[in-house]
Amino acid sequence: MQIHKFGGASTNSVERIRNVHSIVSSLPLGKKLIVVSALGKTTNALEKVVQFSVNGEKEKAMEELNRIRTQHLNMGSELFGSHKECLEGLNAFFDEATENLKGLSNKNYNKSYDSMVHFGELFSSFMVSSFLNIKGVRNVWLDVRKVLKTNDHFREAGILWDVCKPLIRDEIDNLFIDESVIITQGFIGKTLKGDDTTLGREGSDFTAAIFANILHAESVTIWKDVNGVMNADPKQVKDTVPVSHLNYKEVIEMAYYGAQVIHPKTIKPLQNESIPLFVRCFLQPDLQGTVINGIAPEQLPPMIVFKKKQVLFSFQTSDFSFIEGKPSREIKNIFAAALVKGNLTQNTAISMLICIDENEDKQNRILSESKNFIVSVETGLTLLTIRHYTGEVIDTFTKGKQIILEQRTKDTLQVLFRE
Ligand code: ASP
Ligand code: MG
């Protein structure tokens, strides 16, 4: 059984949903579970609906929801043709979402958020499922909330793995008796009490990985608008190259240094079952894209990550005693209490340097807790990380830069410089 995940960009127009049909119908025969996330920017739009509503701007909330409805229904009319029952089905979800508007409140903000935002995935998956059925790719639509049970940490819900395992196995086995394609939603779930939940923004990849882990899938494929994982963000670096093979460890490392690749949360369930993850381009399905598995790649190009808006804290003991030991533990505790992760840390005899993401609240909190130290703060910095660096690449990216701090291991170079 294969799992395929289609993100918001891959379903964001009538043409793109037609393209999903063409991709799915050209996949090899066999069982497939398809995970769909909300169309385009629908999740952001639904967030706006919640915001307007809890701010008491009920009319604006309704307007925004109606705008989303019209957009989906216009696409639906084109895709469904004479199949009025599909349009009615889609409309029914919007009636439900409109009804749900009434219950939103600032008191239960996160719960209200999930009760509204989860609809995006119901709309999109229903559209894709209906269209594929019309086009003869027979499939069954599964409401993932029936089997994906979570705790009630709304907006960042945790998976109840032990509850999900038998539910998912039984339900999927059962559905595969009659159909070889199942279409369901990413990102959303339900508590045992019956409240709707979401797994955190961009959570649909994670859903695909959960299913893969529990069902021992043969592979997961994530369809994106780029040709696999690149060695750097094309928005930041010219001449990026796609990387055809990575291992789980490299992806986790890259994410740690700030690359917007696949989230480690998604990698873990796959790594535990040695399930390969393919990242492919829905615009050019003939290209191979990237495979991520447990095998160490033979050679990797330099992997480059820029993290802007960095702040460097420098702590010095006020009595010039060594920083090692108690002072250094105290600083670490201050950062932990402020829920701040250091992106780069360096010690000298009497000082400790920690580079973090800019965040005014957290910076103030750290400052107010650091009375025992002489502290200086430098803002407006960029942290460059290069894995598998070469002399040439280092020169290209650091030439002319005012370097504040540099750290190197065998695989990784990190340079902090002024923007
Ligand atoms: N639709 C959700 C979001 O935009 C989940 C996802 O796309 O993975 O965050
Ligand atoms: Mg998305």
Image (spheres, grey):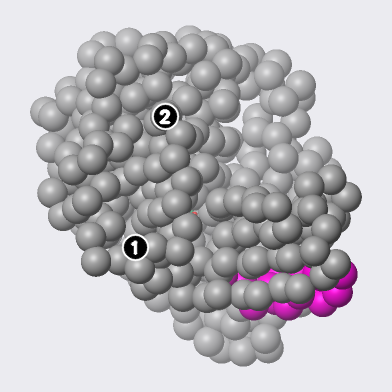
- Which residues, given as a range, are shown in magenta? 358-373
Total marks drawn?
2
Which dot, 2 or 1, sits closer to the camera? 2
User: Callout 2: helix, strand or loop?
Assistant: loop
Regarding residue 372, the answer to whether it shows in the image is: yes
To which residue does mark 1 refer?
73
Q: Does the magenta segment cover residue 31?
A: no
Q: Quadrant of the C terminus?
A: bottom left
Residue 410: assigned label: 2
Amino acid under label 1? Leu
Q: Is residue 351 above or below residue 280?
A: below
In the depicted view, which residue is nearer to us: 242 or 387? 387
The verdict on residue 368 being magenta is: yes
Front-most of residues 352 and 350: 350
Q: Position of residue 187 (x, y in %)?
A: 55, 45
Where in the figure is residue 402, as x and y percent of width and height? 35, 68
